[in-house]
Amino acid sequence: MRIPLLCLTLATAACAPPQDADSTTNDEPDPAPSSTPFIRDDQGRALIFHGMNVDSHAKSSPGRELDISPDEIAMMADDWGLNFVRMLVLWDQAEPTPGVYDEAYFDRIEARLDQFDANGMKVMLDMHQDLYAAKFTGDGAPEWAIRDDGLPFKAQTLSWALNYFQPAVQRSFDNFWAYTDGDHADLQDHYAALWAHLAERFQDHPAVIGYDLMNEPHPGSDFDLAEIVGREELADGGTSRTFDEGKLGPFYQRVIHAIREVDSDSWLFVESRYGGPGNGGRSFLPVLDDPRPEEPRLVYAPHLYSFDLEAQGTYPSDDPTIPFWEARRTEELARQPMPMVLGEWGLAHDATDAARFDDEVLAMSDRMMAGWAYWSWDPGGTWPFWVREGQAETPHLDRAVRTYPRAVAGDPLGFHVDPDTGAFSLTFVDRDGVSGPTEIYVPSRHYPNGVDVRSTDLDGTWSFAWSQTRADVLEVTTTATGGQHAIYITRKP
């Protein structure tokens, strides 16, 4: 949950993004060019991920255990059509003393990875932190990595996010980011070395697609209130630009290089800073370099939360979060083209017009051909999709269980599903060296009488069949023509 730091108490129109002339349109973007980057499998197919974060429970459990059963994992894959997991890893458990790693913890992670792999789900390992460390009512860094210089900390009760303003928390982040200024470079060196160790340990696991280098990096004292109060952005980006360009970008580059020393193939996921970007503000991350000899395998993994929705418990029709978020991310991907996976999005579903927020986030993700991971799995409260006590799905799950292309035998140009009629379309072009069918998840819950499938390909040059291994997955085989293909699915009456 990402509640705005000051909008908690203000909860007014002042928390809306600025009305830039070039950012107020709701028009859908033009179709992406065929050169749009995608995560690809070993057959060269473009992958689209729909998935889940697992899970918040691990932040506070002894041994950082995940609270999910094999049957629940199978349910995600077979009943919900999910093919992706963002799985929390906690630094304090992984490296309890400097340079000493908890291999028993990694064994437990591997056992979970085996279960996800058995269900055909890919996993992104996420080095998670909130509020820097458990000492500050959060999670992340071990005790030995806390450098708060003895500054005070008083737990805030109105919202956990307000703890980011506590002097000890801000100083701990400042010292972590001070790689070239001060005596704390060992913190990032240890962090990068831990990632190298994890990559060496898990790079060959068939479930692991890559690594999320840090959850919601917080700027510490560089956090700029101007991007929250009134959502005004300084012309030069202020301290947000200073942080992104001078601290976060170089940090990512160090970790990327450390991982590439041992693992040249896994995908490396980078996030925008905590705060404004999650609500539609700009990120100023510099262009990052992937030193692997082949094409770069960097993925943009920003988060999305509506501050107003969380603060006020309602999603007004004029909330500009989603169009702003789409516009900003489009700008950033133009600066550094890379695949995008929406690493976190979610909401309390007792909020007014929550279903419309679901629909708009999912439609936007489809427009951008971006994968996503919902926050989060852990049952309890009004956010999750599953009520464990009653063994029942929550009603809003049906918004997220939707038709989508899991793997495309070429370069996707665009896809769209109408959640009311079930009508689905996918357009893609051939790509050299791609093998295997295009896989489309078609949830039978939304097509009770079956589906009709057609293509623009000439008769005899394409075919389709239901997968023998994955529930509700349609496998479409097209003949390479050097051109464009379109597939259409409609609901039988």
Image: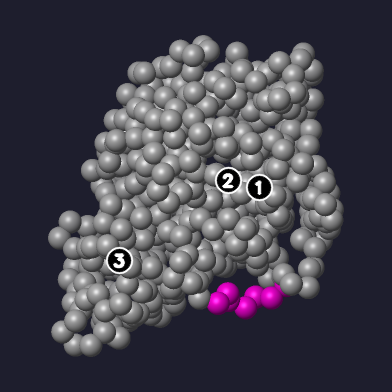
Q: Position of residue 384 (x, y in %)?
A: 48, 49
Q: How many marks?
A: 3
Q: Which residue is mark 1?
A: 285
Q: Is there CB contact under 8 Å for labels 2 and 1? A: yes
The reply to whether residue 345 is visible in this rendering is yes
Q: Amino acid at mark 2?
A: Leu
Residue located 17% across and 71% down the image: 465
Q: Secondary structure at mark 3?
A: loop
Dot label at residue 25 = none
> Where on the picture, by quarter, is residue 43?
bottom left
Three-letter code for the amino acid on which mark 3 is drawn: Asp
Taking depth in this image into account, of 6 and 406 the one nearest to the observer is 406
* Magenta stretch in the rendered image: 24-30
Viewer-side label of 2, 1: 2
Q: Could you say where residue 55 lies in the image, as x and y percent from the top left?
A: 46, 38
Rendering quarter of residue 448: bottom left
